[in-house]
Image (tube, rainbow, N blue to C red):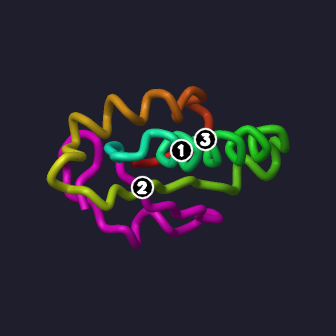
Amino acid sequence: MLDTSGHSVKLSVLTRSKITLLTFFYTYCVDPLDAHLRTRRSPLLRDRVRGDRALAKRVRFVSVSLDPTHDTPEVIAGYSKEFTIDPQFDWRF
């Protein structure tokens, strides 16, 4: 896979040493209501996990795009800024 900088990374590296919450997504959807509802669930879960400091240190979110044609590293880097608001919270795209 490619990270937001365009560097190759193995999924196995992102699923070690922490509880991993893995999601699959895409940034473009023909049904904006459906896409909006799907993308709002993860931040709600993030905020609940962040509310428990001990748990937050043990959890990593990993979000993988299912649309490599549209979701380039540059697109994902911009998209991820909305979700990675806390630099102490481990959320990888």
The part of the image, by quadrant, that contains residue 37 is top right
| Label 2 sits on residue | 25
Residue at position x 62%, y 63% in the image: 18
Q: Sequence order check: which comes first, mark 2 or mark 1?
A: 2
Q: Circle 2 — which element?
A: strand
Please tell me the numbered disc located at residue 21.
Answer: none
For the record, the magenta segment spans 1-26
Residue at position x 61%, y 34% in the image: 88
| Label 3 sits on residue | 40
Marks 2 & 1, CB-CB < 8 Å contact: yes
Give the alpha-carbon distance from disc 2 to disc 1, as whole Å: 8 Å
Residue at position x 42%, y 55% in the image: 25
**Residue at the extreme left of the image, as rendered:** 69
Asked if residue 32 is positioned above or below residue 23 in the image, the reply reads above
Q: Quadrant of the N terminus?
A: bottom left
The part of the image, by quadrant, that contains residue 66 is bottom left
Q: Sequence order check: which comes first, mark 2 or mark 3?
A: 2
Amino acid type at circle 1 is: Thr
Amino acid type at circle 3 is: Arg
| Label 1 sits on residue | 39
Q: Does the magenta-highlighted stretch encompass residue 42?
A: no
**Count of picture labels:** 3
Give the alpha-carbon distance from disc 2 to disc 3, as whole Å: 12 Å
Q: Position of residue 28 (x, y in %)?
A: 32, 44
Marks 3 & 1, CB-CB < 8 Å contact: yes
Amino acid type at circle 2 is: Phe
Q: Circle 3 — which element?
A: helix
Give the alpha-carbon distance from disc 3 to disc 1, as whole Å: 4 Å
Question: What is the crowding at mark 3: few (fewer than 14 residues within 10 Å), some, or many (at least 20)?
Answer: few
Q: Position of residue 45 (x, y in %)?
A: 71, 48
